[in-house]
Image (cartoon, grey):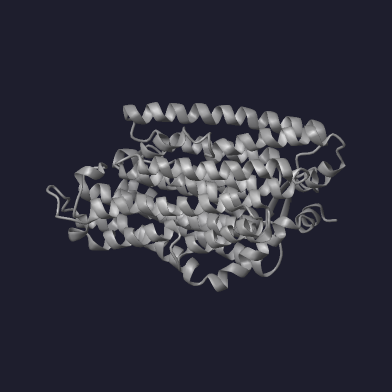
Amino acid sequence: MNNLIVLPIILPLVASVIVAFFPKKLNIARKFSQITSVLLTAVAAYLAWYVFTNETVVMQSGGWDAPFGISIVGDSLSMLLVLTSSIVGTAAIFYAPSALEEQQEKFYFYTFYFLLISGVSGAFMTGDLFNLFVFFEVLLMASYGLIVLGNGKIQLRESFKYVLFNLFSSMLFVTSVAFIYAITGTVNLAHLAERVGEIEEQGILTTVAIVLFFVFAVKAAIFPLYYWLPNSYVVPNPVVSALFGALLTKVGIYSILRVFTLIFVHDTGVTHQIFIWLAMLTMLFGVIGALSTNNVKLIITYNIIPAIGFMLMGVGLFTETAIAGSVYYLMHDMVIKGALFFFIGALIVAAGTKDLTKMTGVIQKYPLLGWLFFIASLVLAGVPPFSGFIGKLLLLQGGLDQEEFLLVIVALVSSLLILFSMMRIFIRGFWGELMEGISDNRKRVRNLTIPGLVLLSISVYLGIAAESVYPHIEAIANMLLDRTEYISTVLKE
């Protein structure tokens, strides 16, 4: 089993190389990618089942024991997120043929897709801070290839900005890793968790922790470092936007969740209080952006940002209930963001425009798309009994337990504004008289709707079946707060 745990990283990496040999043969590339993605999801599901029912699985590469070897750690949190990523990725690979132009597919879309999935899975599973940087670079290289597919003027301009910001944060990341190694003599996460308690100059550690948080904040698009995200995620094809919105920022918030529950817990009065204030500002500024535009895709993109604020809220509160809320919300948001980008892509094809002021009555011709979008909007806003409600309920309970009343009020107001921003699309875009020039390509709209339906069904299940899901999330929260299990498993103490 220890050797199998690396399959979610190796399988898509190998697939990216294989599919690169026949980029022009689209039928072969599509079928190969779809079959491989389904297989990858099955593998991730089996590994997640094994970890949840048995124990954390650790693979030490190169024959060296931790902390000297490279550790790949399949614990309950990492495997949950790997499985969720695989599900979203599989939905995207079935969505892609109807969303992309043939030219875009031929320019190595499937190669970059598998490379992205490999990097995301590796970031979730690595037990080494330096290799977290490496996997960040792998997924970023893939995202650079995906964001420029189409070669439009606006696309190239936004991709240039996207690359610059990520290059800067990557340089800061590797510099932070060097500082941490100089201070502690290790980059293994479990070994770092032991060493930080032995350092006498805690102020230096706090400074390095804040710098490292800055790096992850850029990746996660936390206020005030989110301004690179909206246009960068809007200009690509909807399938690329779905992958970015569902996966990339989540790797950043996962890194914060992992590092600031495992390693930097020596001065939570400073770091975690900063998280609470940034969580509030991220919620507010993200939802204000969603209300400020009539571009339907940009509305969905801006709604990525307040969701990150909710996840950061749980890390800042640093209680079992709040951490469980962050994990639940993280899993929920990966799925629902993918579904919403799929639905918006279908809406744009049906209406022939992204401008909300120029579309109306789409639900009359495409009722399934309209009502699925309506349900997805309720899920995103956290209306009971859906999955967004479960995560937010846990976070609000954690906030009330810690008497962070301002945080709770901001979270509630943000939730209402998120719902309002989504209902604008439903009321103005789907409702009303049937617009002129609406697309007659029902087959394409249907093909763009079905993958979103699959993800929405999973999201609805996460809410309705919360009683069966929550015990596993609670166990993850307990594991994150009790560092001894992770440390002893990796270091074999």
Q: Residue 485: percent from the left, percent from the top? A: 77, 59
> Which residue: 63% across, 45% down?
256
Q: Residue at x 18, y 60 (%)?
A: 364
Displayed quadrant of residue 384: bottom left
**Is 378 left or right of 254, judged from the image as shown?**
left
Q: Position of residue 432 (x, y in %)?
A: 18, 55
The part of the image, by quadrant, that contains residue 48 is: bottom right
| Front-most of residues 238 and 261 | 261
- Residue 264 visible in the displayed image: no
Q: Is residue 152 left or right of residue 8?
A: left
Above or below, 285 against 481 in this view is: above
Classify 106 as above or below 466: above
In this orientation, which residue lies closer to the viewer: 98 or 445? 445
Q: Total marks drawn? A: 0
Residue sitting at x 57%, y 55%: 81
The residue at the point 64 percent across, 48 percent down is 316
- Where does the image place residue 29, in percent across and percent down from the top left? 39, 48
Pick the quarter of the image with the N terminus.
bottom right
Corner quadrant of residue 367 = bottom left
Residue 302 horizontal/vertical position (percent): 42, 43
Looking at the rendered image, the quarter that the C terminus falls into is: bottom right
Q: Is residue 225 left or right of residue 179?
A: left
Residue 480 visible (yes or no): yes
